[in-house]
Amino acid sequence: MIIDIQTKIGEYLELIEAIREDFDDPVIAMTVLQEIRKDARAEEIRRGRGFSSTGDLPATDAQIGYLKSLGGEVPEHGLTRNQASKMIEELQLKKGAVVVEKVPRQRF
């Protein structure tokens, strides 16, 4: 365990030095390092779960319920969230329901 920690510290020190070569300000270099690590950790979590995004997760109970209320049929093997969302939109259009356009979330 101690060796793993020492190895990681060594890797971070090498990385921070490489980043400092591109940025004169050590605070900016440290911030960039933190963001790189956050991105790497998020990717590890995604891979560990086996999902590329939440759209690959199974459809929610709310989606399934709404699909059924619109007269949709849910396949035996189930649906992903993306598939359920697409089916809901198609059924809403067929029924003449008001469809709210999805607007991508802004991250600040």
Image: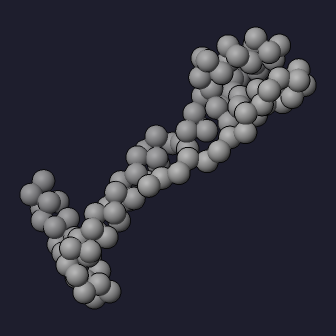
Residue that lies at the very extreme toward the left in this rendered image:
2
Say which residue appears at 20% left-offset and 78% top-offset. 26
From this view, report whether residue 4 is shown above or below residue 93: below
Residue 37 position within the rendered picture, expressed as x and y whole percent measured from the top left:
32, 61
Q: What is the quadrant of the C terminus in the image?
A: bottom left
Q: Nearer the viewer, residue 89 or 79?
A: 89
Q: Nearer the viewer, residue 36 or 5?
A: 36
Please tell me which residue is depicted at 40% across the width and 46% down the height of the picture. Answer: 45
Q: How is the image coloured?
A: one colour
Q: Position of residue 70 (x, y in %)?
A: 80, 15
In this picture, residue 91 sits left or right of residue 43 = right
In the depicted structure, whether residue 27 falls above or below residue 82: below
Residue 91 shows in the view: no
Whether residue 25 is visible to the viewer of this picture, yes or no, is: yes
Q: How many numbered discs, if any?
A: 0
Residue at image coords 17%, 60% = 4
Q: Position of residue 11 (x, y in %)?
A: 23, 72
Answer above or below: position of 62 versus 45: above
> How far across and down, in percent of the image, does residue 8 sit?
20, 65
On the image, which quarter does residue 10 sit in?
bottom left
Q: Quadrant of residue 85?
A: top right
Determine which quarter of the picture holds residue 81: top right
Residue at the (53%, 51%) spot, across then down: 106
Relative side of 108 to 17, left or right: right
